[in-house]
Amino acid sequence: MTQISDDEYALLNHVMMWGSGGYPIDRIRHRWVWSDYRGVAGSPIRYKTKREATAAFEVWHTIALARLRVLGRIAR
């Protein structure tokens, strides 16, 4: 399991503090994207709906939390 970067940890803290309102989801023209946050690259895909963009971010969020649990930085 790879270490989690400081930027990934900052994004996780931001989301833990603000909940889903802190997700880096933005609208660009008629599409939705998961935007870059500090050094964490967002999704290269533009989604038709905000729900799809949110689901893509939540997949990353789930993986990042699992990495933290494996590294022992958060409780199970």
Image (cartoon, rainbow, N blue to C red):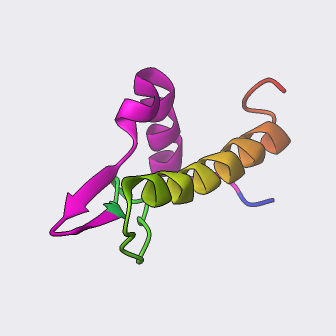
Counting labels gives 0
Task: Work out whether 27 lies above or below 69.
Answer: below
The residue shown at (44%, 69%) is: 43
Image coordinates of residue 47 in percent, x first then y, are: 39, 69
Image coordinates of residue 49 in percent, x first then y, are: 38, 61
Image coordinates of residue 16 in percent, x first then y, are: 51, 27
Q: Is residue 1 left or right of residue 34?
A: right
Q: Is 14 one of the magenta-colored residues?
A: yes
Q: Is residue 43 left or right of residue 75?
A: left
Q: Is residue 32 left or right of residue 72?
A: left
Q: Which residue reaches farthest bottom? A: 44
The residue shown at (68%, 47%) is: 62
Task: Work out whether 55 lies above or below 29.
Answer: above
Q: To which quarter of the image does residue 72 belong?
A: top right
Task: Work out whether 20 lies above or below 37.
Answer: above
Q: Which residues are magenta?
A: 3-32
Image coordinates of residue 46 in percent, x first then y, are: 36, 74
The residue shown at (37%, 35%) is: 22
The residue shown at (79%, 37%) is: 69
Q: Is residue 17 left or right of residue 28?
A: right
Q: Nearer the viewer, residue 16 or 7?
A: 16
Specify the quadrant that holds the C terminus: top right
Q: Nearer the viewer, residue 60 or 8?
A: 60
Q: Nearer the viewer, residue 18 or 53?
A: 53
Q: Is 55 one of the magenta-colored residues?
A: no
Q: To which quarter of the image does residue 10 belong?
A: top left
